[in-house]
Image (cartoon, rainbow, N blue to C red):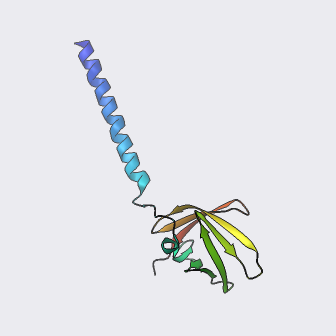
C-alpha cells in the first residue's frame, strides 16, 4: 500500500512539473513569432517607447532615414547583418539578434551595444 502512495506522489510531481513547463513556454513565446531576416521584413520605422519618443530611424528598400539629424544612409543586408554606409563612406554594422512584427533587437558591432527597438505601427 505504501508503494502505491509513493508512486501516486511521484506521478503528481511529474504532472505538476510538466504543467509548469507548458505554462513557462507559453509565456516565454509572448506571441512574438520571429520573422525571416529580409529587407522586406525590415521595412518600417523603429524606436524606443512609442508613447514618448520619436522613431530613431526608418528602414526602406535601400536606405535608412534618421529623422532627428535628417540624414539618409545607404545600407545592405548581408545574412543577419545590416551594413550601413554613410555619405562620408563610414561603415557601421548592426547584427540582427531578433526580428518580429513588433520589434527589432540589434547589436551595434562597433560599440558592442544591444538595442531593443519597437516597430512603429503607423
**Is 50 situated left or right of 57 in this image?**
left
Name the residue rendered at 76%, 78% in the picture.
89
Name the residue rendered at 48%, 71% in the picture.
41
**Is 103 situated left or right of 89 in this image?**
left
Name the residue rendered at 56%, 68% in the picture.
117
Name the residue rendered at 45%, 77% in the picture.
121
> In the rendered image, which quarter is residue 18 located in?
top left
> In the rendered image, which quarter is residue 88 located in?
bottom right
Instruction: Please provide percent x and percent y for residue 49.
Output: 54, 72
Instruction: Please provide percent x and percent y for residue 120.
Output: 49, 76
Q: Give whichever of 109, 6 is nearer the camera.
A: 109
- The relative height of residue 83 versus residue 68 in the rendered view (above or below) is above
Quarter of the picture containing the N terminus is top left
**Is 122 situated left or right of 91 in this image?**
left
Instruction: Please provide percent x and percent y for residue 92.
Output: 71, 70
- The relative height of residue 27 versus residue 17 in the rendered view (above or below) is below
Q: Give whichever of 79, 116 is nearer the camera.
A: 79
Amino acid at each position: 500500500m505504501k508503494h502505491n502512495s509513493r508512486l501516486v506522489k511521484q506521478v503528481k510531481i511529474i504532472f505538476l512539473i510538466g504543467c509548469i513547463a507548458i505554462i513557462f513556454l507559453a509565456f516565454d513565446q509572448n506571441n512574438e513569432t520571429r520573422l525571416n531576416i529580409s529587407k522586406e521584413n525590415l521595412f518600417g520605422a523603429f524606436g524606443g517607447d512609442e508613447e514618448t519618443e520619436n522613431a530613431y530611424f526608418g528602414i526602406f528598400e535601400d536606405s535608412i532615414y534618421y529623422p532627428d539629424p535628417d540624414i539618409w544612409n545607404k545600407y545592405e543586408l548581408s545574412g543577419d547583418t545590416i551594413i550601413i554606409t554613410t555619405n562620408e563612406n563610414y561603415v557601421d554594422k548592426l547584427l540582427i539578434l531578433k526580428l518580429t512584427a513588433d520589434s527589432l533587437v540589434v547589436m551595434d558591432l562597433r560599440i558592442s551595444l544591444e538595442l531593443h527597438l519597437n516597430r512603429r505601427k503607423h
